[in-house]
C-alpha cells in the first residue's frame, strides 16, 4: 500500500514537469482560425484537420515534423474540415461542414468521397472509431441531428435519425461497439445521450436546462471509465461550464468555466485537467474544476486528446503538445480570432432589425434571439452560404418585443459571437 501511494505521488509530481507547447513545422493560422481536430493512433503517428483553411497534416514522430497530405484545392471546392479519426494506420475518415465525408485507405495519402450514406449528411461534427471495424459519426451543430454508423470499416453505412432526442449533435464517443455517448443540444438545453445497444435506442443522462447551450466535447477517463467530463458552451452573458460525473453519468456536478464559448476539455486524472475555447488558451485545474489557472499558452482551443498522464495533444490555432520535451526556442505569438463581418444597419430599432454579413467562405449560420440575461427567445434563421465572398442582408421584425436590450447570437462554422441591440 505504501508503495502504491508513493507510485501515484511520483506520477503526479512527474506530470507537473510537463508543459503545453506549440509543435513545430506546422502552420500557425492567421486570423486566429483553428485546427478543429487532432487524432493520434499512438505516441508518434497522428493527423490534424485544419478547419477554415481545409488541410490535413500527418506526423510520424510525435509532432516534431508534419507533412501536408490534403488541401481543399486538391478536392476542387470550398471546404471546412471539422474532424479526423483513424481505425488503424491505413483506414481513416475526415468529416467536413461542407456536405462531403471523406475516407482514406492508405494512411491519408489519398482520399475519396463516401457516397453510400442515405440521406447524405450535411455535415459531420464528431467521429469515433472503436474496435477493429466500427465507426460512428454525428452531426451537426446546426439541425437536424443524426448519427452515421459502419460495422465494416466504412464499406457500408447506416443513417440514424436522432431528431427525437436532439436538435443538434457535435460529439460522439463509444466505450465499445455497443456502449456510447452522443452530445449536443435539444429544445431544453445542452444534452448528453447514452446507448447500450450500438445506437438503436438512446436515453438522456444530462441536460443543462438552459436553452441554447451545447455539450460540446466529452471525455471518459481511461483509468476510471465511470468518470466522465463534458464541456458546456453557453450563451452570452453566461459562462460555459465543466460538467463531471463519477458514476457513469447518473449524477453530475457543474463548475463555471472562464468564458462563454468553452469547448475543449481534457483530464489526465479525476482532478487535473484543462479547458479552453474560442477566446482562450489553456486553463488548468488541479481540483476537478473548482478553480482554474490561466497558463497563457495557446489560443482558440477545440480538442484535447489524452494519450497518457504525461502525453497529450490539442488543436487550436496550431497543434499543441503536453510534454517535457523542448519543441522550439522560438517565441510563439497567438492571433486573435477573426470575427464575422457583421454590420448592423439600425440601432436602436423600432419595428425591424436590419444587418448585413460578409462571408469570406461558404458557411453554415444559425441566428438566434436572446434577452439581455441570455434567455432564449426564438430562432431567427438557419442559413446555408454557398458562395464565398458574398454579402447577405437580413431583416427581422421586432414589433412584438418589449422595449429593452436584446442579444443576437451568431453561430457559424468558425465560432459563436453576439451583438446587442436596443428595441425602443
Image (cartoon, rainbow, N blue to C red):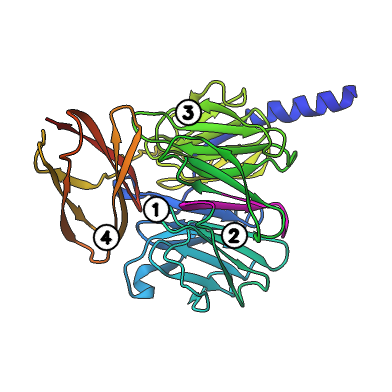
Q: Which mark is residue 257?
A: 3
Question: In the rendered structure, which disc, 4 or 2, sits on the residue that comes first in sequence?
Answer: 2
Q: Is residue 407 left or right of residue 152?
A: left
In this figure, which residue is indicated by the disc labeled 2? Answer: 60
Q: Secondary structure at mark 2?
A: loop
Q: Nearer the viewer, mark 4 or mark 1?
A: 4
Q: Which residues are magenta?
A: 165-182
Q: Are marks 4 and 1 in contact (CB under 8 Å)?
A: no
What whole-number distance in Å separates the C-alpha atoms at marks 4 and 3?
Answer: 31 Å
Residue 95 in picture, x, y percent from top left: 48, 63
**At which x and y percent is residue 346?**
9, 40
- Residue 81 x, y percent position in the rendering: 42, 60
Taking the image as shown, residue 5 lies to the left or right of residue 135, namely right
Residue at x-position 50% and y-position 65%: 94
- Answer with left or right where residue 22 lies relative to residue 305: left
Dot 4: what SS? loop
Say if 134 sits above or below 21 in the image.
below
Q: Is residue 79 left or right of residue 390?
A: right
- Specify the quadrant of the image occupied by residue 369: top left
Q: Nearer the viewer, mark 4 or mark 2?
A: 4
Proximity of marks 4 and 3: CB atoms separated by less than 8 Å = no
Can residue 129 be seen in the rendering of this structure?
yes
Classed neighbour count for the residue bearing mark 1: other residues with Cα under 10 Å, few (<14), some (14–19), many (≥20)? some
What separation in Å lies between label 2 and label 3 (alpha carbons)? 34 Å
Q: Which residue is mark 4?
A: 361
Secondary structure of the residue carrying tag 1 is: loop
Q: Residue at x 78, y 28 (%)?
A: 8
Residue identified by numbered label 1: 27
Amino acid at each position: 500500500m505504501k508503495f502504491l501511494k508513493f507510485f501515484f505521488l511520483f506520477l503526479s509530481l512527474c506530470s507537473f514537469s510537463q508543459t503545453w507547447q506549440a509543435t513545430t513545422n506546422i502552420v500557425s493560422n492567421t486570423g486566429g482560425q483553428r485546427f478543429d481536430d487532432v487524432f493520434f493512433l499512438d505516441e508518434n503517428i497522428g493527423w490534424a484537420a485544419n478547419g477554415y483553411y481545409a488541410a490535413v497534416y500527418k506526423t510520424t514522430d510525435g509532432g516534431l515534423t508534419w507533412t501536408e497530405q490534403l488541401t481543399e484545392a486538391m478536392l476542387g471546392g470550398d471546404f471546412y474540415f471539422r474532424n479526423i479519426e483513424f481505425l488503424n494506420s491505413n483506414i481513416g475518415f475526415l468529416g467536413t461542414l461542407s456536405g462531403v465525408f471523406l475516407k482514406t485507405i492508405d494512411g491519408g495519402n489519398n482520399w475519396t468521397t463516401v457516397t453510400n450514406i442515405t440521406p447524405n449528411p450535411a455535415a459531420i461534427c464528431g467521429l469515433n472509431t472503436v474496435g477493429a471495424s466500427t465507426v460512428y459519426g454525428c452531426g451537426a451543430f446546426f439541425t437536424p441531428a443524426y448519427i452515421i454508423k459502419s460495422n465494416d470499416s466504412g464499406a457500408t453505412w447506416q443513417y440514424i435519425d436522432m431528431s427525437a432526442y436532439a436538435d443538434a449533435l457535435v460529439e460522439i464517443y463509444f466505450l465499445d461497439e455497443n456502449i456510447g455517448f452522443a452530445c449536443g443540444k435539444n429544445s431544453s438545453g445542452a444534452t448528453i445521450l447514452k446507448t447500450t445497444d450500438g445506437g438503436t435506442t438512446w436515453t438522456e443522462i444530462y441536460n443543462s436546462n438552459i436553452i441554447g447551450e451545447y455539450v460540446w466535447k466529452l471525455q471518459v477517463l481511461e483509468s476510471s471509465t465511470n468518470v466522465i467530463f463534458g464541456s458546456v458552451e453557453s450563451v452570452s452573458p453566461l459562462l460555459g461550464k465543466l460538467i463531471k460525473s463519477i458514476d457513469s453519468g447518473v449524477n453530475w456536478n457543474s463548475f463555471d468555466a472562464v468564458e462563454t464559448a468553452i469547448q475543449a476539455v481534457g483530464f489526465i486524472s479525476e482532478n487535473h485537467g484543462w479547458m479552453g475555447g474560442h477566446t482562450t488558451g489553456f486553463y488548468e485545474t488541479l481540483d476537478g474544476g473548482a478553480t482554474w489557472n490561466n497558463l497563457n499558452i495557446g489560443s482558440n482551443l477545440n480538442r484535447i486528446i489524452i494519450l497518457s498522464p504525461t502525453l497529450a495533444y490539442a488543436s487550436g490555432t496550431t497543434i499543441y503538445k503536453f510534454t517535457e520535451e523542448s519543441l522550439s526556442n522560438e517565441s510563439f505569438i497567438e492571433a486573435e480570432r477573426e470575427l464575422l463581418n457583421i454590420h448592423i444597419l439600425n440601432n436602436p430599432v423600432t419595428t425591424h432589425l436590419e444587418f448585413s454579413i460578409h462571408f469570406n467562405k461558404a458557411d453554415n449560420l444559425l441566428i438566434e434571439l436572446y434577452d439581455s440575461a441570455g434567455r432564449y427567445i426564438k430562432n431567427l434563421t438557419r442559413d446555408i452560404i454557398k458562395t464565398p465572398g458574398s454579402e447577405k442582408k437580413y431583416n427581422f421584425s421586432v414589433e412584438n418585443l418589449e422595449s429593452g436590450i436584446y442579444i443576437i447570437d451568431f453561430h457559424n462554422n468558425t465560432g459563436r459571437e453576439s451583438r446587442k441591440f436596443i428595441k425602443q
